[in-house]
Image (cartoon, helix red, strand yellow):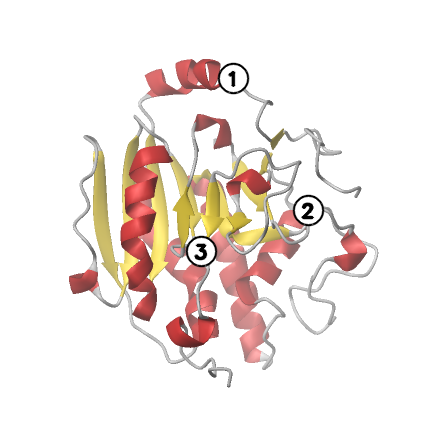
Amino acid sequence: YAIIYFIAVTPWLAPIVWEGTFNPLVVDSIYKPMHLSIATTVFAVGKYVRFLRDFLETAEKHFMVDFKVRYYIFTDRGGDVPAVVLAPGRKVTIIPVPGSNRWQEISSRRMEMIQTTIENQIGKEADYIFCLDVDTKFHGRWGAETLSRLVAAVHPGYYKQTHEHYPYERRPASRAYIPAGEGDYYYGGATIAGYVGDVHKLAKYCREQLEADAANSIEAAWQEESHLNRYLLYNKPTKILSPEYLWQDFKAKTNEVQIIRFSQVNKNYAEVRPNVKKRK
C-alpha cells in the first residue's frame, strides 16, 4: 500500500488513529460509562525488570486514565517489581516465568504465555487486552480511541516505506512467509491489542507457527513479529495506531507525528539482553 502518513483509513476501511482524528471528550463519554476492564501485559524478564518503574509510573499518568486497568507483569524477578502508586481500580498481578539465556526464546515464548494466561486468568477478568513492551514510556494521552476488536500499531521504522521495503519473512520454508508483492503495512510487535478473545486467537496462531518453525529448525527473521505480520495480513486489524502510539527515542520527531504518546527507550542491547555480544 501507499505510504501511511496522513492517511486516516485503510483500504479495508479500518481507522488509523492520529492526533486530530478523534475527539477525546466524545470518545471518553462513550466508553467510560461501560465500566470496562483493561488487561495490560508486559514482560520484564532478566535485566528488563529495570524498565518497569518508568513504564508503570508513566502509564499511570497517560494510559487509559480513569479506566479499570490490571497490569500483568511476567517476570523471573518478582522481588524486583517496584512498588508504584496506582490509581483506584488499578492493580498489578505478577505472573512468574522462567528466565532464559537467549532473548530470542523470551520473545518467542511471549505468545505462548499470553495465550495460556488468557485461558487461565485474563479471560475471566478483562474485556480488552493490550500487550505492550516494557522498555517503553508513555508521553501523552493513550485512551479509549485505541479500543477495537483487533488493534495493531505501525512500526515507526517503516511508516514512510512501501511494502517491498518491509522486513517480512521472505523464506518460503518459514510459516511467517509473506510473498514478494504482498503486504499491507509493517506492524510493530511492541503493541498488540483488542478484545481478549481476538488477541487469544492471534497469540495461539503465532505460538503454533513459532513451534512449527522450531520443529523445522527455522527461526523467522524477527521472531514473533514476523508471525504477527503474517497473521495480520490475512486477519485485518479493525483499527491501526499511527506511530504516535509506537515511537523510538532514538528517532528525531517528524512533522507528520505531531505528538509522541508511547516510545521505546534507548538502551544498550548487549547490556540488557542475554546472548548479545558487547561491541568493542
The amino acid type found where label 1 is placed reads: Asn
The amino acid type found where label 2 is placed reads: Tyr
The answer to whether residue 25 is seen in the rendering is yes
Which quadrant of the figure has residue 236? top right
The residue identified by callout 3 is 265
The amino acid type found where label 3 is placed reads: Val
Q: Mark 3 or mark 2, which is nearer to you?
A: 3
Residue 149 % position (x, y): 52, 34
Residue 222 % position (x, y): 59, 66
Q: Quadrant of the N terminus?
A: top right
Q: Secondary structure at mark 3?
A: loop
Q: Is residue 47 left or right of residue 92?
A: right
Residue for point 52% across, 71% down: 211
Marks 3 and 1 in Cβ contact (< 8 Å): no
Residue 11 % position (x, y): 75, 33
Q: Mark 3 or mark 1, which is nearer to you?
A: 3
Q: Secondary structure at mark 1?
A: loop
Residue for point 54% across, 56% down: 250
The disc, 3 or 1, on the residue closer to the chain's N-terminal end is: 1
Residue for point 61% across, 78% down: 218
Residue for point 51% across, 39% down: 260
Work out how far the residue at label 1 is from the one at label 2, CA to CA, in angstroms. Answer: 24 Å
The residue identified by callout 1 is 23
- Please say if 127 is above or below 225: above
The disc, 3 or 2, on the residue closer to the chain's N-terminal end is: 2
Work out how far the residue at label 3 is from the one at label 1, CA to CA, in angstroms. Answer: 28 Å
Tell me the tag on residue 159.
2
Q: Is residue 76 left or right of residue 169?
A: left
Mark 1: give few (<14), some (14-19) or many (20+) Cα within 10 Å.
few
Q: Secondary structure at mark 2?
A: loop
